Image (spheres, coloured by chain):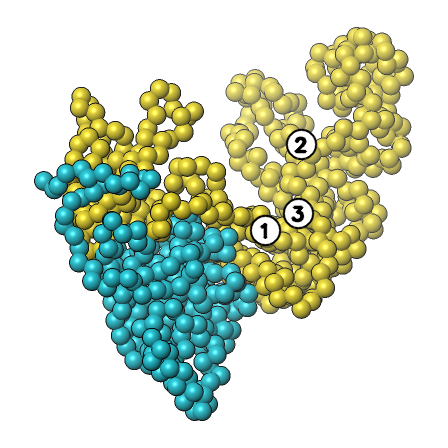
Chain colours: A cyan, B yellow
Amino acid sequence: MSTSAEKVAALRRSLATDGLDGELSRALPLGHVGADAVLPGGLRIGALHEVYAADPVHSAPACAFATALALRLGGTKILVWVATDFSSLEFGAPYANGFLELGLDPARLLFVRMPNGEDALRAATDILACTGVGALVIEIPGPVKALDLTASRRLYLAAAHKSVSVILLRPGATPEASAAETRWLVHAATSPPLREEDWGIPRLNVQLLRNRHGELGNWEMKWDCGNGLFKQPDNTNSTPHHSDLAAASFDGSLAAQGGLQ
Amino acid sequence: MRIAALDARASKCGLHVGQPLANARAMIEPFDVVEADEAADAKLLNRIADWCDRFTPFVAVDGPNGLFLDVTGVTHLFGNERAMMEAVLTAIKKQGFAVSSGMAGTAVAARAFSRYAPNTIAAPSGEAQAIAPLPVEALECADAIAHALKRAGLKTIGQVATRQRAELASRFGKAFVFTLERALGQNESPISPRLPLPDYMAERRFAEPVTVETVILATLRGLAADIAQVLEQRGQGARMLEAVFFRADGEVRRIAIQTGSPTRDPILIERLFRLKLDALPDPLDPGFGFDLIRLGATLAQRAEDRSIGFDDNANDKKEISQLVDMLSARFGSHRVLRFIPQDTHIPEAASLAVPAQYAAPENIVWRKKPATSKGPRRPLRLFAKPEPIDVVAQVPDGPPIRFRWRRVLHTASFAEGPERIEMEWWRHDGKVPTRDYFRVQDSEGRRFWLYRDGPYRPEAASPRWYMHGVFA
């Protein structure tokens, strides 16, 4: 651990001498050692980050990752979530109690529900003109013609100008070229068996597909809801257990109900 | 079939309203008969009332063919009362209607003048004198009463007025005495306007009707500045504003905007109107131009002046409030939402999405319940309608072993539960529906929230399973 910390410090020093220090101070580390090593000082505030879902049917892990990023980058300001009617039907509507459990206070959330992707982008442009916003999550499912390289470049510039972090969540879409600072592809990761208390904590398998200022990588992370940062999961060997299907009663005591079949 | 209305020639020939058509035909031949269409007449009357809005915002409909215009405080704009009445009558006659009118201090007196002594204007204390020569039918009381008055030898209102109120009340009822007093200008009953009156109002007339949008918006900004001055004196701000556009050919269009917090800023008001006009599904069509534009504040509230300080928090709140107003004006207030916690254990009702313009953000407090397990107990996404799934589970209350959702088969590797949620017993007589929720992880690591609708009963049909939400 000390050697990696030293490496990070050395990197920081060399970047400072190159004159890039000003940008570094406006970045927040994720908390996960592996990911932070390739990100220059952490995730940049005031930039465009993209999150894709590996599973076209199930977008909740990607949504959780986007929420976590917004939480880290947004500070204490208002978070705006722009979604389309279709994403609420297909992937489920954002549930405020779920956000609360994940660590995001729903009182900070402003939810804008647009009829389609083009209107969502239009609303996003309006929102980026306002300075009181901490982070903006734009959830656009599926391909949208209006979201091309020019549009993403415009989003990137607007985000940098107003120093509002923009997270573009694209469930059900395949990763495509854009002007993003970082691009992430999120899988669900299996939790360790029920006997450990960690079961149920969001576990994600995250792949960094594009990084403007650093290398790519593939890590497994867990999200610490209480403290609001990513952590290295305790056992990285997460093979699914096909053994007893134990149904725990809600106060935590286990009662095995016999095997399968 | 009876006659409902006549024109001047027909009434000269001796026909009257209410006469059976057959009799009329027998008396005179030939004449044109048009079937009465009450709905269309009412619509036309409403449109005329809309158009009369340009003279005063206080317009009320009176019967099937009359209008009340309360012109208190407006007559000086036209010179004097006589000039105003001339202006109104000429304008209506130009549209092709036959119209007569009267002006007085009370509604009943004005009505009587308009029908029995057209073009009379009675000063507020001179109604009694002016109305005296009118026949008793002008009081618009029941036929029986009018008949009885005539038999008693009282043919004009002046003669009725000389009688004692007590004896009139005992013979014809108290209601008649009230009507008489209103006719004489001694009493007044309020008339209620068709549309609510704005608290503050400013208008601009154009000698040359305007069609250009930039001019219209600039006018709105100027009118907003006028209203803002008066609002500032009272320490108030406007929450709801309505702009009324009067076209030169008689059409009237009303556009309203609202804001989350009271405002006096003309530039913000103009911007909100511009967004609203751009987003209208039926765009504002000037036609030959608008000759009158009026801006009214229909809802005003206390608004203190806050000095611009270095407090970022307050500035941010103001920015967010303006952002909410702009998005609501552009896309509709039902699309910009905030979540409000509800005190209920039913999952889909525990969080209420409310338009952000109506929700006061300071009052929203979400309290996190102490966690019994480390992971989230509520899913991140919730389906508005729980989706039915096919489940293989051990009876009677085992967790799901395999389930099919959206045509994909999932094999459960873990399940936690059940969490039993009972519906509100006071809403259901007898059997209260219950749901047993399970948190299930499948072999790929995806986590679901699904429930069984009701307990398993051997004699009844097996309960259905539903997918309600997905976890991270």
Q: Quadrant of residue A6?
A: bottom left
Q: Residue visible at 21% across and 25% down?
A: B457
The residue at which mark 2 appears reads as: B62
Q: Secondary structure at mark 1?
A: helix
Q: Earlier in the sequence, mark 3 or mark 2?
A: 2
Q: Nearer the viewer, mark 3 or mark 1?
A: 1
Q: Quadrant of the C terminus of chain B?
A: bottom left
Residue B268 visible here: no
Mark 2: amino acid? Asp
Q: Position of residue A51 (x, y in %)?
A: 32, 66
Tell me, yes or no, whether the two marked residues, 3 and 1, touch with CB atoms within 8 Å: no
Residue B312 visible here: yes
Q: Position of residue A90 (x, y in %)?
A: 29, 52
Mark 3: amino acid? Thr
**Along the viewing direction, whichever of B84 and B12 lies nearer the viewer:** B84
Badge 1: chain ID = B
